[in-house]
Image: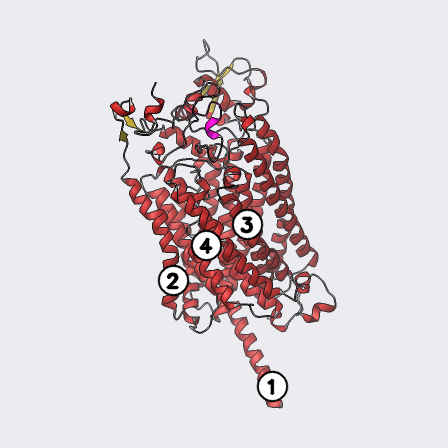
């Protein structure tokens, strides 16, 4: 009897040691990515405030060319996508991949640092080029054309060790849905990125087809990079925190393969009614609406996994952010379907609804899931716990209300704008009515980005303190509610 | 998924198929597109469709300043929107034309390295702006001081494309005719830089409603 219990003890001990060794092996690069990502996130939200203000009052801060809306808006989105999104995404991917495959990062840590530095330098120079008059005006690819090879090389430096970890741990009989998604993201992103950049920057010119390729690029990056990273993270953390296995492996497989098959078809519907051959927007529209199936399947699976453990959403910061992120997945899917079908699409086309979709997907869905992951990962890497419950709560509520405001006002503004544009009485009117009608929404957006900036500044400070090793020295994690249910956090949640 | 290789193959196939059909094959086919000659008997016009390329130098300025964030260059067909009936968005500047402006085709943008179809429509559509433009002078004033014409305008003032200089001798005929709050100090004048001239050239070259050979050409012949 005694021997069994002591051998179980040594097993737990060995497990913990193995986990600690894995954490230690990826600590530096992961924290580097998170910290730089959080910095870019803050920069991007500040730029978001400025862009909204400039859209409302174009002469605000003078007529300095660097700060005109046409340059600020792309800088804001590029900082969000490449500075924060891809970078923080890589950090989460690397940690989950190492943990889930049980592999330490064997070698090449310095390569990862160098790649990370190159990525950040490339993004910085690229964004400065946009501001100082080097913008290509190709959505999400506004940075000048010499930037992308550097970014691609840096990304591949991270993707390679993840692929080898995945390959070493691949078990034919086992099914590890979170690493599937993450490997998918490693695999799809470079492919999409190279295709779009070569097509738009290296080929002699694709005219209107180029615009279609660009729309495809934006949708594919959302559907086949941001979505897989966020879903992979949710599939890892929801079972971990609730202590329940993923509800259904069939649903999980279905959700994965349906996304893999449909994601690449979306995009061209962005220019419905435009110069592209009619079948292209049609198939994009079809795929975007069909995406509701995998979106619903994954949503259902997450819901079933959380079932009965909803009280943990209140106490665990990780689960709270992940839960909200997972909730935003179906919402993003519905918004995509709304802007993509041929009934409501033409009304919402060329309006703020498009901005609303980008933000709900990249911020609401992806970033919230990544915040959840960061709140779990960082204490394990730094060996100390988050300092302040209040800061986490502040981050959560400001982000939630901010994002909800931006998404809802953008959608309503889109309906308003689209309705105005297509109103029969507007046929000989100038844009006075349109400008006046969108103003309140733009002000709301500026305020919302302001709130989010506030929370992000504190998030950055909190993260910096943690990385500096100034967190709480305690064996108990920082929970949002200390109550009767604290002890009900399953053991695995602390591992 | 029996093994790693099958998994990777499945990933490749599921994404590679749309990639091939939607991007690669259309991109290769696009390279073969050339201007189409009008048939004088059937279409009633001579020359090629599309007739003249846009002004590329000005388009670079258009890209740099991010004009496409607020201006579209794409007329949608009437079953999807009322773009085609909007006053002044086509060649016919008169109120209530008999036929709507036609929607655009791939060939309308032939010769442009990248077509700026646009992100949002916060300002008027510019597809056929070349027909609507009044005079270079007014376009320059619009770019330099958008609120001189409409005080509610939310368009940025692109003062970086203009030069304020000491007026020497007789006033340059290029100088912008600006009214009170926008006018420079006495003795100074505002003149367009070559970039502004190129941008205006580009905007004037935007005429994407040329008749399509064999389809609309006969109908619009005058």
Q: Secondary structure at mark 1?
A: helix
Left or right of A209 on screen, residue A291: right
Q: Which residue is mark 4?
A: A224
- The answer to whether the residue labelled 3 contacts the one labelled 4, judged by CB atoms less than 8 Å apart, is no
Separation of residues labelled 3 and 1 (CA atoms): 53 Å
* Residue A114 visible to an observer of this rendering: no
Which mark, by number, is residue B10? 2
Q: Which residue is mark 3?
A: A334
**Location of the C terminus of chain A (image quadrant):** bottom right
- The answer to whether the residue labelled 3 contacts the one labelled 2, judged by CB atoms less than 8 Å apart, is no
* Residue at the spot 57% in from the left edge and 62% down from the top edge: A302
Of badges 4 and 1, the one in the foreground is: 4
State the residue lying farthest toward the top: B170
- Magenta range is B83-90
The chain identifier of the residue carrying mark 3 reads: A
The chain identifier of the residue carrying mark 2 reads: B
Q: Which residue is mark 1?
A: A6
Compared to residue B79, the image places residue A268 above or below, namely below
Separation of residues labelled 4 and 1 (CA atoms): 46 Å
| B168, A337: nearer the viewer | A337
């Amino acid at each position: 009897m005694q021997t069994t219990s002591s051998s179980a003890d040594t097993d737990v001990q060995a497990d913990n040691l193995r986990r600690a060794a894995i954490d230690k092996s990826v600590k530096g690069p992961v924290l580097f990515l998170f910290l730089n990502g959080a910095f870019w996130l803050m920069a991007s939200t500040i730029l978001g405030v400025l862009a909204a203000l400039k859209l409302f009052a174009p002469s605000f801060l003078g007529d300095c060319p660097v700060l005109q809306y046409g340059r600020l808006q792309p800088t804001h989105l590029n900082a969000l996508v490449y500075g924060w999104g891809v970078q923080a995404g890589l950090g989460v991917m690397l940690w989950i991949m190492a943990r889930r495959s049980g592999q330490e990062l064997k070698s090449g840590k310095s390569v990862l640092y160098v790649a990370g530095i190159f990525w950040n330098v490339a993004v910085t120079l690229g964004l400065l080029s946009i501001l100082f008059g080097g913008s290509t005006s190709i959505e999400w690819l506004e940075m000048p054309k010499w930037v992308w090879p550097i970014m691609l090389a840096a990304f591949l430096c991270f993707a390679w060790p993840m692929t080898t970890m995945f390959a070493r741990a691949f078990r034919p009989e086992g099914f590890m849905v979170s690493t599937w998604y993450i490997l998918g993201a490693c695999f799809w992103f470079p492919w999409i990125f190279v295709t779009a950049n070569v097509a738009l920057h290296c080929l002699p010119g694709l005219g209107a087809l180029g615009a279609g390729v660009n729309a495809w690029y934006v949708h594919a990056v959302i559907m086949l990079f941001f979505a897989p990273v966020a879903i992979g993270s949710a599939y890892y953390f929801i079972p971990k925190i609730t202590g329940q296995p993923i509800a259904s492996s069939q649903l999980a497989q279905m959700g994965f393969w349906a996304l893999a098959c449909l994601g690449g078809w979306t995009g061209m519907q962005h220019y419905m009614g435009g110069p592209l051959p009619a079948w292209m927007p049609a198939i994009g529209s079809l795929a975007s609406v069909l995406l509701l199936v995998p979106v619903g399947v994954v949503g259902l699976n997450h819901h079933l996994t959380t079932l009965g453990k909803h009280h943990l959403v209140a106490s665990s910061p990780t689960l709270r952010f992940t839960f909200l992120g997972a909730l935003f997945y179906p919402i993003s899917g519905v918004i995509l379907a709304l802007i993509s079908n041929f009934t409501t699409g033409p009304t919402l086309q060329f309006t703020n609804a498009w901005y609303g979709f980008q933000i709900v997907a990249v911020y609401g869905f992806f970033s919230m899931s990544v915040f959840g992951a960061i709140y779990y990962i960082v204490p394990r890497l730094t060996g100390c716990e988050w300092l302040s419950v209040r800061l986490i709560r502040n981050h959560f509520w400001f982000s939630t209300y901010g994002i909800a405001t931006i998404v809802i006002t953008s959608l309503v503004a889109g309906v308003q704008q689209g309705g105005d544009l297509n109103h029969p009485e507007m046929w000989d009117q100038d844009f006075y009515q349109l400008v006046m009608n969108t103003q309140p929404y733009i002000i709301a957006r500026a305020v919302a980005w302001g709130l989010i900036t506030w929370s992000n500044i504190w998030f950055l400070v909190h993260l910096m303190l943690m990385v500096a090793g100034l967190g709480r020295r305690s064996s108990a994690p920082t929970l949002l509610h200390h109550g009767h249910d604290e002890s009900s956090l399953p053991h695995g949640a602390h591992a | 998924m029996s093994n790693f290789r099958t998994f990777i193959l499945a990933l490749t196939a599921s994404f590679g198929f749309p990639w091939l059909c939607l991007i690669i094959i259309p991109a290769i086919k696009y390279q073969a597109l050339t201007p189409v000659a009008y048939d004088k008997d059937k279409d009633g016009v001579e020359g090629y469709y599309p007739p003249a390329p846009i002004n590329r130098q000005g388009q670079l300025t258009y890209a740099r300043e991010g004009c496409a964030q607020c201006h579209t260059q794409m007329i949608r067909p009437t079953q999807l929107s009322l773009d085609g009936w909007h006053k002044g968005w086509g060649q016919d500047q008169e109120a209530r034309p008999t036929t709507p402006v036609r929607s655009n085709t791939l060939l309308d943008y032939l010769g442009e390295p990248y077509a700026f179809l646009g992100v949002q429509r916060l300002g008027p559509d510019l597809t056929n702006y070349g027909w609507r433009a009044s005079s270079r002078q007014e376009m320059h004033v619009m770019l330099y001081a958008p609120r001189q014409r409409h005080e509610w305008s939310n368009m940025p003032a692109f003062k970086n494309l203009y030069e304020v200089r000491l007026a020497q001798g007789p006033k340059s005929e290029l100088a912008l005719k600006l009214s009170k709050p926008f006018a420079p100090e006495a003795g100074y004048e505002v003149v367009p830089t070559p970039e502004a001239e190129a941008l205006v050239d580009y905007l004037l070259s935007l005429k994407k409603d040329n008749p399509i050979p064999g389809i609309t050409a006969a109908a619009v012949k005058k």
